[in-house]
Every structure is written in structure tokens, then in C-alpha cells.
Image: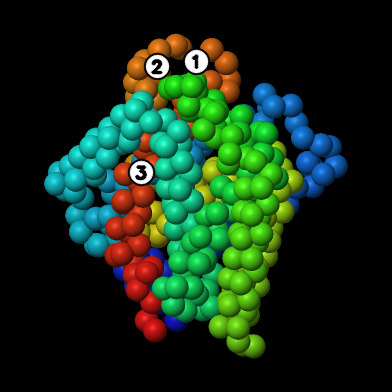
Amino acid sequence: MTSDSIPRDTAARGRDGARRRAARLSLGCGLLTIGVSISITTVAGSPRLIYQYIPLVLSVVVLGLPHGAVDHLALPRVRGDPVTARSIGFVCVLYLFVGTAYAVFWWLAPAAAFTLFVLVTLVHWGQGDVYALLAFVGADHLETRADRLLALVVRGGIPMLVPLIAFPERYASVAETLVGTFDPGSTARLELVVSPTVRTALAVAFGTGIALTLLFGFVRAGRDGRGPWLVDLTETLGLVAYFAVVPPVLAIGLYFCFWHSLRHVLRTMLVDPIASAALDRGAIVGASRRFSRDATPLTAGGLMVLVAMGRTLPQTPATVPDVVALYLVTIAVLTLPHVVVVTLLDREQRVWSPSD
């Protein structure tokens, strides 16, 4: 298996320079974020909680919310089709019905909705890293569908589960704020999840899964193909250390912007002929400007959803944690249909159809 197993990346075909620059931006920015954050936290300690919210607040306009705002363009571009009213309408209807259904679910069963949010985010962030490993790193050790599924669970599980194990009180506080926004009485149901017994069992099980996944990759890579595996190893262990050391609110905010969202933005650039050509000739600013123009309308739409969600709450959010909780619920509502679009992208690019 090689990176050619993603053949529907039509805009990047014949533009190896675009793919290489996307890979350097993805790997470099991600590892820099991890290294700097761990170093500063280790030396200076955790910043005040109010400052930890800054990356999440900035993600409203910096990469975070905009990264899914080109869903209506990504599918026709990856297929090499023109963008039509029908293709745009499909995505709009998808967001309207799936997003609305999930928003109603938050009102009816907020604790269950929060659990679903964690699971959906785990899958989605894992999806993003599997694609990046294949397209940007050429991960030959992810040879089969089972290998890629294990990688998805590990990569998506790290940001969702390691903070729970390392920072149970803060994890519980964020969860209670989200759930309590809709039903304060439901927060007691979350106490079992952060109990020492559950966290110990989770740490043993998930740690074993990480070790086995990396071991399987090492064996499949062979002596001559361990370069991509070493990148996988470095990123995986770096992410574990990052989420175990950096406070979860800050860690998730930085990861959301400069790891997950950046990788997806680069993916959408590679299927856009104009942005891909700009990357190919090193015009990163031009490619970014193109993406920003495309993402602006639906980013504004996402902000309208945020305002609409806020107006439905029984009490207006009065503190920064309350406002961020509302934003995270909005992100959850928008993520579910976004995952459907990314799954279709995966199918078009044969992410889950390795040539065994």
C-alpha cells in the first residue's frame, strides 16, 4: 500500500509539491504545538483557567469552526464534478435535518448527547489522522482496513480519553457545564465515569491498545519501511504526553485548531484545483485566502446556529465557561453532519479500501 491508495485526490494528482507542502505544514505545525505546549506547561505551570479558554474562543474564526465550512464544495471537487445547486442542497439538507435532530437530543437527554459527542468526536478526529497518515506520511504499515480502524481508535481516543485519565476533575467540570446547560439534574450521571476504578481500567485497556497498535505497525513496516512508522510513533507518543501534561481545556483548544482542523483544511485544499495549484508553487497565502473565501458563508451560518442555540436556553450564558459550553454544544451539533461528509470523502478517496 502506498499513498496511491488515495487516487481520487484529483486536484493533487500530478502535484506532488502540493502534497509535500501540505505534509510539512501538517506535521510541522502539529509537532510544534505539542512541543511548545508541553515545554511551557512543564516549566511555567498551567496558566489561569480563564486564559486556557483563549484557543477555543479563537477557534470560532481561526481554523476551528471554518474547517468544516467547505463541506458543500469538497465532495464535488474530490469527484471532479462541478459545484451545482443540487450538490450544495444535499449538504444543506444534511446539516438541517441531522443537526436539528441532534440539537433536539441535547434538550431531551443531555447526558446521553454528551456521551454521543465524545464518541462521534473520537471517530471523527481518528478519521482525520488516518487520512493524514496515508496521504501525508505514506503510512505503508496501515496495510489493512483493520490496521486503519485500530489507528482511528488510538488517534481519536487520545484527545478524548487521556484528559479523562489525567485530569478527571477538570474533565468532569467541563462535562457538567455542558450537560448542566440543559439539565442540571443530569450531571450526577457523569460521576461514575471519572471514578478511580473506571479510569484505571480505561488507562490499562487503552494503553494496551496503543502499544499493540504500534507493535503491529512496527512488524508490518519491515526494515525498509519504518520511516512512516516512526512518524506515527512520534505523533502518537507525543499526543499522549501532550494530553497528559497540558490542561485539557487548553490542550483541546490548541489541538482543535492547529492539529485536527489544519489537517482537514489542507485536505480540502488538495481537492480544490486552484488552492492545490497555489500550494504546488509555494503560494501558501494564496491557498489560504482561497479557503477563507470559500469558508466564509458557512462559517457565518455556523455563528447563526450558535446564536440560535443560545436563544433557546432557559438562561443566557453569563460566564466564559458557560459561553464556551454553548459553543461546544454548537460544534457538536455541526460535527455530526460534518462526519457524514468526511465519511463520503473517505469513500471517494478509498481511505477504507486498501489494495490488499
- Mark 1 residue element: loop
Residue on which the image places disc 2: 313
Residue at position x 62%, y 54% in the image? 202
Q: Position of residue 51 (x, y in %)?
A: 68, 27
Q: Position of residue 129 (x, y in %)?
A: 50, 59
The outermost residue toward the bottom is 223
Residue 191, labelled with which disc?
Answer: none
Total numbered labels: 3
| Closer to us: 167 or 125 | 167
Residue 317, labelled with which disc?
Answer: 1
Residue at position x 61%, y 29% in the image? 173
Q: Please, is residue 332 above or below residue 229 in the view?
A: above
Tell me whether the residue at label 1 lies in contact with that at label 2, contact meaning CB atoms closer than 8 angstroms. Answer: yes
Residue on which the image places disc 3: 336
Q: Position of residue 154 (x, y in %)?
A: 55, 61
The amino acid pointed to by label 1 is Pro
User: Is residue 200 found left or right of 102 in the rendered image?
Assistant: right
The local crowd at label 1, few if under 14, some if 14 to 19, many if 20 or more residues have their Cα within 10 Å, is some
Q: Position of residue 172 (x, y in %)?
A: 61, 33
Q: Please, is residue 271 above or below residue 3 in the view?
A: above
Is residue 33 visible to us here? no
Mark toward the start of the polypeptide (3 vs 1): 1
Inter-mark Cα distance, 3 to 1: 24 Å
